[in-house]
Amino acid sequence: MRDFALSRIVPVMPRLSLAVPMLLTSVVAACTSPQYAIYQQQHAGGGSSETSASSDAGAETSGDSPSASSETSSAAETSVAATTQTDGDPTAGDSGTSGTSTGDDGKAVPVAVEVFVEPSPVTEVGPVQVSVSTSRPVASINVFLKKNNEDGDVPLVVGAAPGNPVHVFEVTSEDAPGDGMHTIRAVAHAADGVSGEASSALLIDVQPGGSDVWPPYVKAGPINGFTSAALRGNGIDVAGYFETNDGLAAVAVRVDGTKGQPEGEPVVLGPVAVTGGGRGPAIAAAGDDAAFVAWTQADNGSTRWAVSRVKFGEAKGPVWSGPSKTSANAIAVVDDMLVVVGAIEIGPNTHDLGVWWVSAESGQVLLVQSFVPPPGDDPNNWRDEIARGVAIVGDEVVVVGERETKNAELALVRRTVVLRFGLDGSPFSEWTLPGDLLDEDAALAVAPLREGGFVITGWGRNLNTVRQVLTRWFTAEGEHVSVRVEPTPSDDALGFAVGEDREGKIIVAGALHQPTTDANAWIFAVPGPAGAHVWEVIRNGPGQGPDEAAGLALDAWGHVYVAGSEFDALQPRAFALRLYP
């Protein structure tokens, strides 16, 4: 196994809902700037100047630039008085050089600067806009960040052209750039060598990772549990199971991302035969206004998979059924096709892994791929293979699950299987875990990585021991490169869902048995294959019974949406969380 280092690139993604604080005024006359009016009043009559004699370079690289008094001012303060510097001879404007600006006394006109920061204070992750207003035209602007109680400035942007905004930087967590009071300093350079600077206080107070954005949605009633979640717009679509007079039914619900409450009525889809993390019902978002749900329904003593298109606020659409003796555990959307993954029943407790490409318009099965061990490994096809998760990774469909095989002692064990297909269903590769770390394991979920490749989670254990959450990293070529075990030697634990946030942390949602008679929902973030948990949340329902975090979705700002079920007095109930990254 070769070493593998994961590096992360956090994109700058301006939030459209942020209001622009002020138009940048690189062409506003000096008399229209209140800062410059103050400057004129302070310097009227005597012609004396309190401008700094230092050069631009010295002023911009100094670690002592904004005074301590300005840094600790109110967070609502938007700017402080500007400092003006003149490079070279202040009378250079008399030579007629293009771009110079001089007053009636023949001296270069100062540049007054104001700095505006939006939002301030910053209370959640997202973009921060830095805008700059100048009293006369300037050629470029440099922006610096100074953290209180730290020496030196951190350049945010150097040589920015006047625009709106001058710079947008990202607050990605309570650690980046860090909670507390900061100072944003801007230095504006005019074409005639005159420069001015000003600063603004910036307070960052972001909630720690893993804390609630809105109160958890929990409601006793007919919706017993959520088993899958998909991000769509400002919120999540969730699938789960609904108790009816005739038994359990698959259900879809839309949860608003701002308030954490359901939007409209739940959509009840049809009878469901099996439920739970790694077994569905499963949901996948499709475009801006719809989602698809896949589940397993009973069929004359056996089962078959079912799929339905859900458009919230409208009547339930048609239900498309798969072949008899099939089941569905996960679903993905590829353009105008659906990829449904699960199993094909061969005999009692024996399945072949199944993958179906289905038309998103008609429900017609377009292609079927199955995984069956070679005859030399399983001549009578008696061993069990099941697909548990699917994800679109670049231009591939990656399917993960489990298969039975024999270990070195010829005992039957379960091992992770990873299948890679083209988007059209053409097979690329198959990989089975060789049992390098633990005796057996299984993959329950897969998610793409932004830099290429994918990550899977599930469980692993040695024989006759409890299961532990096992997470593995793969390259874009499907090469296994890293593995991580969350040691819970006395508690059975599984990872049902996985994703990568904007900072490159891996988020795992699952269940932890503490003790084995009671399972708790377990959500945690890890920095990579090594390192302590960045944060974790253990949710213990009010009753002694199975609680599990089965569905996971992450938005562009890094917020973590979790859907699952928890046990109340006599039955499970659904819950949904939204956590800070």
Image: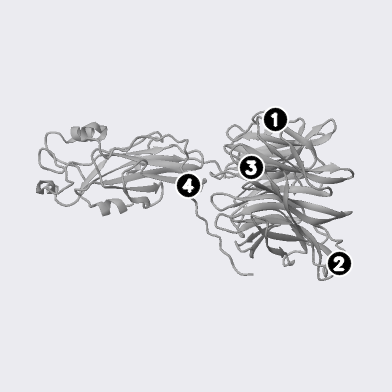
**Whole-Å distance between the Cαs marked 3 and 4?**
34 Å
Q: Position of residue 437 (x, y in %)?
A: 72, 65
Residue at mark 4 = 178
- Which residue is found at the position 68% from the left and 41% from the top? 292
Q: Quadrant of residue 181?
A: top left
> Mark 1 is on which residue type?
Ala
| Residue 69 seen from this side | no
Q: Is residue 162 left or right of residue 108?
A: right
Q: Position of residue 211 (x, y in %)?
A: 60, 41
> Mark 3 is on which residue type?
Ala
> Mark 2 is on which residue type?
Pro
Q: Earlier in the sequence, mark 3 or mark 1?
A: 3
**Whole-Å distance between the Cαs marked 3 and 1?**
18 Å
Disc 3 + disc 1, Cβ < 8 Å: no
In the displayed structure, would residue 397 be above or below residue 174?
A: below
Q: Earlier in the sequence, mark 2 or mark 1?
A: 1
- Which residue is found at the position 25% from the left and 51% from the top? 56
User: For the residue carrying disc 2, how many other residues have a C-alpha within 10 Å: few (<14), some (14-19), or many (20+)?
Assistant: few
Q: Which mark is residue 285?
A: 3
| Residue 173 seen from this side | yes
Q: Earlier in the sequence, mark 2 or mark 4?
A: 4
Which quadrant does the C terminus fall into?
A: top right
Disc 2 + disc 1, Cβ < 8 Å: no
Q: Quadrant of residue 231?
A: top right
Q: Earlier in the sequence, mark 1 or mark 4?
A: 4
Residue at mark 1 = 315
Q: Position of residue 8 (x, y in %)?
A: 52, 56
